[in-house]
Image: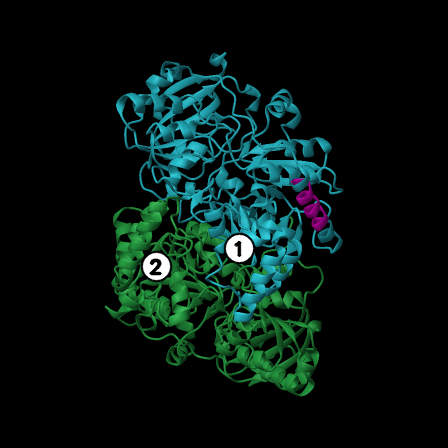
Chain colours: A cyan, B green
Amino acid sequence: MWQQRLRRADLHQKIMPAEQAVQYIKAGMTVGMSGFTRAGDSKAIPVALAAKSATQGPLNLTLYTGASLGNNSDGLMAESGVLARRAPFQVDADMRRSINEGKVLFYDQHLSELAEHLRAEPGYPIDVAVIEAIAITEEGHIVPSTSVGNSATFVSQAKKIIIELNTAMPAGLEGYHDVYLPKTRPGREPIPLTDVSQRLGTQAIAVDPERIVAIVLTDTLDSPSTATPPDAETQAIAKHIVSFLEGEVAAGRLTESLLPLQVGIGSIANAVTQGLVESNFKDLTMYSEVLQDSAFHLLESGQLKFASASSITVTAPMMEHFFANLDHYRDRVVLRPQEISNHPEIVRRLGIIAINAALEFDLYGNVNSTHVSGTKMMNGIGGSGDFARNAHLSIFVTKSLAKGGAISRVVPMVSHVDHCEHDVDILVTDQGLADLRGLAPRERAALIIENCVHPNYRAALADYFERACARGGHTPHLLEEALSWHQRFEDQGDMRQKEVALS
Amino acid sequence: MWQQRLRRADLHQKIMPAEQAVQYIKAGMTVGMSGFTRAGDSKAIPVALAAKSATQGPLNLTLYTGASLGNNSDGLMAESGVLARRAPFQVDADMRRSINEGKVLFYDQHLSELAEHLRAEPGYPIDVAVIEAIAITEEGHIVPSTSVGNSATFVSQAKKIIIELNTAMPAGLEGYHDVYLPKTRPGREPIPLTDVSQRLGTQAIAVDPERIVAIVLTDTLDSPSTATPPDAETQAIAKHIVSFLEGEVAAGRLTESLLPLQVGIGSIANAVTQGLVESNFKDLTMYSEVLQDSAFHLLESGQLKFASASSITVTAPMMEHFFANLDHYRDRVVLRPQEISNHPEIVRRLGIIAINAALEFDLYGNVNSTHVSGTKMMNGIGGSGDFARNAHLSIFVTKSLAKGGAISRVVPMVSHVDHCEHDVDILVTDQGLADLRGLAPRERAALIIENCVHPNYRAALADYFERACARGGHTPHLLEEALSWHQRFEDQGDMRQKEVALS
């Protein structure tokens, strides 16, 4: 079966087991691996690297990817000494622990930017690129699988390339990809994209086959999505957003087809997209980084006309459905490099409606997307910053409570800022929505207290705000109390003051 | 003399004194005024509005501008009840007090974004635009003076237009402007700029003359720049930057002409640009929002080939020199709308080297540009966010100390975040430079302590970092102490602990 996929005969001799292919990856090297939101990641090389590290000593690699990997590859590599440094994103529990213990040095980066940083380096800053493919063309070019991510950049910037040819992925994925990258500076031209469905590049990643040093055959599917189905709170969030967007249409600021939607990854984002299925919007488009189950529901309901992304991350049943209907979706879905799916130039030009999840937000609209209690890394900023800064509407969503009510997601001051007040238009919790556009900080605080915070924390937040205002300032705060809710949670396991907790 | 400037005869009848022109500005209206970094602002209408407000009661206007106004107009309007709401930037001491007392509601915004927000509104969201001009063409189109700012947007979005025709400004400024604005969405095309010197639009702001309701004659120059000459600390900062850029050239990451420079407004920024005069860089270009004295020095030294900006804000002698040599500079300077001078699409495409001033930064590279002690507004974020997020290099500069040493500009945790860790590549003080690219937070902290903090605060910052690391986390902090330096300054007027202050 792999013979039909490896269409350039002189590359047949490069086929070898993963255990042999990792000879090209030596201690201290910089490696770029395919994979974005658990889709299209390398399946065999991480396992072989862990084995090599276990027998030959720590490899201490610098590892770049598109975004998160599946198959617990990140955890396996972190735990076995494969990695010294990691960028730009991860979601693995074991990797997270290593990062927070300072064992793996993590560089958390806007997902559109890694490609620029690599392109700015002279020579080949990547020693080895490891790229999952569904086929290799007659020219030796690489056809990616369920994500494009940074793969095209890694291939162009790598001294050597290892391809994982995955025969578990359907050959029919060929044609879904549109590979286009900006050129070096100076003299770079505009990215000519003006419509979400437009194709700019090639169906495969061009490469000089001389740099392909190994081809490893695999037949494992992506790890399925871990997004949970909508619940009462996430459905409430979705309803608030639909209702707000209906208001924008009524006010003449949007049409019934809105503007292209970007929706982050995870259960809340999935629920928000799902909520659009019950709306009256028509001819919607999506210009996002990842397509979850809900995007396919919206394509099926007919409301979504076209979806552009960098990866497809769905549940096992949806993956089966998608693979069985590749021709059905072929003219309505395109996968692009993450530099293009997330590019500020395009986000601003198209006027995207960006919906991303917050870990917490504060009285004045600052958003923390990454750090638990200001110190412990959760996943990373991902693409949220690529979208929020330049979006037509920058919407952040979170449940109002966490840990059974011990945590309020709305706090006096966020313990870490990923999205500052200047980049946040709309905040939504299950309690309601605050439209912060054009408002001064004191006005935002009043709206957020009224609409977003959970009733269990409302009085305490209003009290903080009132006492802070008495002290004055454009953005009133009580510095000695600003982070006290987080401190209380760290000390006592509950943000509520004792007397409040008892009530 | 004004007769030659007002080249459309049927507009002569619209000439009237400012006191009469303000009849069109009524209580509660939204007004858009020209003016960017004290350049090209309306000179007569603010005074007339203050008088009207004093006699007829508070006007409570919403006032938009390009950026800051000169002539204490902002203070005068704030103090006299002219303003209820203000965006997107200001630098006036009296206005600042009104904002911090909550009397004027200030919406602090990225300077490239106000135009998008207004364009997204249906109808004419501006009631009256007040625009300084050096001439009105035969078609009735408006030729701006020393800034373009948001003037073209205000004109296109305003029901009525008042023009201040300023005969103190030389007629020879005509031809310096390039007026181009993005179109509405969907269907917007790429901004075709690929070189800093490229012209995209027209020399004047097109307008239907029917909407011009008044023309007021003025003859007052702009308020001169308040930037102070370079001192020992700002010269040290400039040297660190020049030396760093030389290293980038040596490493093959930049050529001797670097990439287009953006330099913020103020004394430090002016000194940094001045420092380039003594460098060996050649054929430099500038794609900035404002040109200060140093930009003209660099044009004169021959190192700067071309400068694009939205305004010219210089000292009185430099203004005199510039006005006397308009033909000499004509093919080396262009003034654009601030949406274009600051546009993320262009910043990313050109790969700008962005140098902006920080109020303070922290151990991990987060930058506060706006809030004193996390609460009191200084000026606003200005264009720094437009540039920093998408720059090839995002550099932030500050003196290591302020208030005679009572304030360290390098703190454990900034009290407000305008530029998060993801948007900051390089930090510079008089003490040295920290290159944070690709580093994890703990590595950044070590470099910042070593290179940037003043020796008087180094031990205390190192002690904080060490104790925070012992507690763990990707970004180690002691929440109960994170803002204690600011608290100490608020309580005791000095960030140093007593025993340290005595040493």
Where residue B287 sits, quadrant-wise, is bottom left
Neighbour class for label 1 at 10 Å: few (<14), some, many (≥20)?
Answer: many
**Residue B440 picture location, percent across and down:** 36, 44
Callouts 2 and 1 in the same chain = no
Q: Nearer the viewer, residue A369 or B434?
A: A369
- The image shows residue B153, relative to residue B74, as above or below, that is above
Q: Chain of mark 2?
A: B
Where residue A152 sits, quadrant-wise, is top left
Choose mark 2 or mark 1, whichever is in front. 1
Where residue B129 sits, quadrant-wise, is bottom right
**Residue A375 picture location, percent across and down:** 42, 47
- The image shows residue A388, relative to residue B8, as above or below, that is above
Q: Nearer the viewer, residue B384 or B251?
A: B384
Q: Secondary structure at mark 2?
A: strand
Q: Nearer the viewer, residue A49 or B138?
A: A49
Question: Is the stretch drawn in magenta largely helix, strand or loop?
Answer: helix
* Amino acid type indicated by mark 1: Asn
- Disc marking residue B284: 2
For image coordinates 38% across by 48% down, the residue present is: B476
**What residue is shown with label 1?**
A366
Q: Is A237 covered by the magenta stretch? A: yes
Q: Which residues are magenta?
A: A234-245
Q: Secondary structure at mark 1?
A: loop
For image coordinates 66% across by 37% down, the residue present is: A231
Whether residue B315 is visible here, answered yes or no, is: yes
For image coordinates 40% across by 64% down, the residue present is: B486
Q: Chain of mark 1?
A: A
